[in-house]
Image: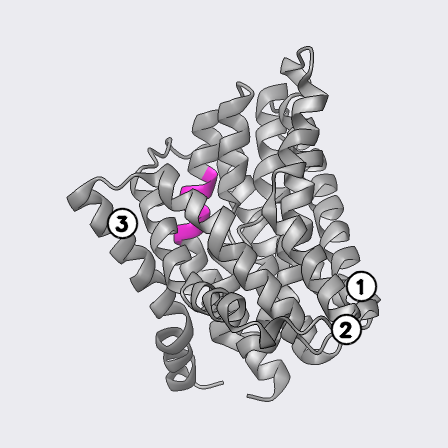
Amino acid sequence: MSFSQFFHLFTDVCLPIFVSVGLGWAMDRRFHLHLESLVKLNIYLMVPAFIFTRVLETELSGHDALKIVAFAAATIAAMFFCSVITGRALVLAAGQKQALSLATMFYNCGNYGLPLVTLAFGHEGAAVQVYVLATMNVATFTVGLFLAQQRHESPGSHRRALLMVLRQPTLYAVLAGIICRSYDVPVKDVTWLWQPLNLLQAGLIGFALVTLGVQMSQTKPAPFRMALWSAISIRLVLGPLIAIALVWLFEFPPLVAASLILAAGAPTAVNTALLAHEFGGDVSFATSAVYYSTLFSLVTTTVNLALLRYWLGG
């Protein structure tokens, strides 16, 4: 791939993402937007609409969907293993080990991954990402929440964890989509329902990126330390390498494999910072991992996409 092709790839796929994020950042600096409202619109309205419509329209079989879920779960487990080894090698304190695990295991497959894969590989790539997003959300508020509260366990914490999982609309959107598809429910014929869902899902990509920009504007990152460098390196560099091994193991077709590898190099999920705040974790470390991994992903994502496009034959 020539430099000219690489540059066009950057300007056509990656730069639009960061321009949209930058607009969100600028809007917040000017108008001090209410982040909680934007996040709720994403989580409870636009993402479920996107997931429901994509599940109904995807050509993936149920077997392929289960393989994608298994891939996402295996990625989380592998990243946890890598974070544990790194934490021990760096002789980190317990709180930093916990923060390192959360920052590397869970990546931003919603606000960042969905727009990225959609721009890079179209709706077929987005359909793959739907099942990754559902798996990541459930894992974040089960495994991630368990890790976050280990040092601050209180009466009713496990019940609260279960309730947080059950409140995630992503799970219900996937289930509803699978049920409607399996039983041939004619949802598309119900115009008053299908059209609003289509309008909402069409607006998700830009809205999610603007929301990410607002989140970055309101983040106060900490100075760099070795643990933070390790978290960013594992998330952005090791994540795609692990994904390469896993897509080969699961024998995914090329386009599905490329979508999964690209998304696996996404920055740290914002939800990890929320968990750190909720359970008295290292908030500074968590927010810094989100902030810096998102910035550095401008470079790593472009490189990953260029290599994947070359592998796919252009």
Query: What is the x, y in percent for residue 298?
Result: 41, 60
Which numbered tag is attached to residue 86?
none
**Which of the two discs, 2 and 3, labels the residue nearer the N terminus?**
3
Q: CA distance from mark 1 to mark 2?
A: 9 Å
The residue most toward the bottom is: 313
Whether residue 57 sits left or right of residue 219 in the image: it is right
Query: What is the x, y in percent for residue 155?
Result: 69, 10
**Which of the two discs, 3 and 1, labels the residue nearer the N terminus?**
3
**In the figure, 32 relative to 308: above or below?**
above
Query: What is the x, y in percent for residue 293?
Result: 46, 48
Residue at image location 52% in from the left, 62% down from the top: 114
Between residues 47 and 153, which one lies in front from this camera angle?
47
Quarter of the picture holding the C terminus: bottom right
Residue at image location 53% in from the left, 60% down from the top: 49
Q: CA distance from mark 2 to mark 3?
A: 37 Å
Residue at image location 41% in from the left, 56% down from the top: 208
What secondary structure characterizes most of the magenta part? helix
Pointer 3 local density, CA inside 10 Å: few below 14, some 14–19, many at least 20: many
Q: Which residue is mark 3?
A: 25
Asked which secondary structure carries label 2, the reply is loop
Residue type pointed to by label 1: Lys
Circle nearer the viewer, 1 or 2: 1
Asked which secondary structure carries label 3, the reply is helix
Which numbered tag is attached to residue 252?
2
Residue type pointed to by label 2: Phe
Q: Which residue is mark 1?
A: 67
- Residue 226 visible to the viewer: no
Residue at image location 55% in from the left, 30% down from the top: 275
| Quadrant hosting residue 99 | top right
Whether residue 189 sits left or right of residue 65 in the image: it is left
Residue type pointed to by label 3: Trp
